[in-house]
Image (tube, rainbow, N blue to C red):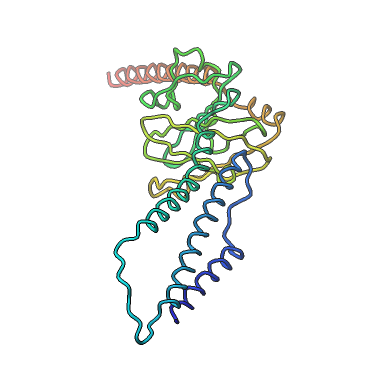
Amino acid sequence: MYTGIVFLAVIIGSIVFHVWTPWWWTDIASNWGAMDDTIILTFWIGGGVFILVCLFMTYCIFKYSYKEGRRAEYKPEDKKLESRLTWITALGVAALLAPGLVVWNNYIKVPENALHVEVMAWQWGWKYRLPGEDGKLGTSSNKSISDDNPFGMNPDDPNGKDDIFIESNELHLAKNRPVKILLRSIDVLHNFYVPQFRAKMDAVPGMITYYWFEPTKNGDYEVLCAEYCGVGHYAMRGTVVVEDEEKYNKWLAKHETFSSFLAKRQNNNFKNKKLVKISNLLSEENNILKEKNVR
């Protein structure tokens, strides 16, 4: 009897905790409200099954509690009951899976007008690459990454000449414009996650993964790495700023393209070579003067 009371207390306590829980998700700021709906539906189906099972066990405790003179009935098989349980379980599992499959189908279908944004993950930060006026990203490879080519760009690809480099943890996006996130990692497993956007995906070394979303609310949103990636994992954070199209274009215009980056590098290399030559000449003159003084 006391066990039945405990089961009832568990049911009531679970419902009360859910209604008044202080832990809940953040306000959504993207098009993926269907993810929230799927989680809520899963909760109610799972919660309903939990309550029914607990009520059934409570009923059995009171119904079949010990009474003097009562004898147990041995019934090893009940095909009708087994058939009902099979169908009920199948329907429950289908109800849990179907909404998620619908959301996943939409998740992998990227709109044709989506802006492609490359996110490059490294221990422990983020870099971004956006297409220029041609709207296309150039090809890249982790094998080509160097101090002179931090994004591993293919210099022979004409589509990459106007690509825009964002060498900071802050990314700006235009409100109500779909975005396809292309994820790369140059070292270990990472995960690009903004809680308010709901969507996320692993950045896997050696391959490019992707997902898409459409930001729907202006604001500053924190980027988290959702995969443990080493001792600096806690500090691998960034910011996504969602703003109107006009402000976004002004921000974009402030950053250099791959062509301007190469030109700056070549200019710096030329200056460095010139300084080296001057240094070598001065060194030779000093050696000549020393030899004369010795004589």
Coordinates of residue 99 in the picture (x, y in percent)? 53, 43
Coordinates of residue 109 in the picture (x, y in percent)? 53, 29
Coordinates of residue 84 in the picture (x, y in percent)? 42, 55
Q: Nearer the viewer, residue 194 or 233?
A: 194
Q: Nearer the viewer, residue 103 or 55?
A: 55
Q: Nearer the viewer, residue 200 or 227?
A: 200
Rendering quarter of residue 229: top left
Rendering quarter of residue 113: top right
In the displayed structure, 30 sits above or below 79; it is above
Q: Nearer the viewer, residue 247 or 103?
A: 103
Residue visible at 46% across and 64% down in the picture:
53
Residue visible at 43% across and 73% down in the picture:
60
In the displayed structure, 105 sits above or below 163; it is below
- How many marks the image carries: the answer is 0
141 to the left or right of 167: left
27 to the left or right of 66: right
Outermost residue on the left side: it is: 295
Residue visible at 41% across and 34% down in the picture:
185
Coordinates of residue 177 in the picture (x, y in percent)? 64, 30
Residue visible at 50% across and 42% down in the picture:
98
Location of the C terminus by quadrant is top left
Rendering quarter of residue 24: bottom right
Location of the N terminus by quadrant is bottom left
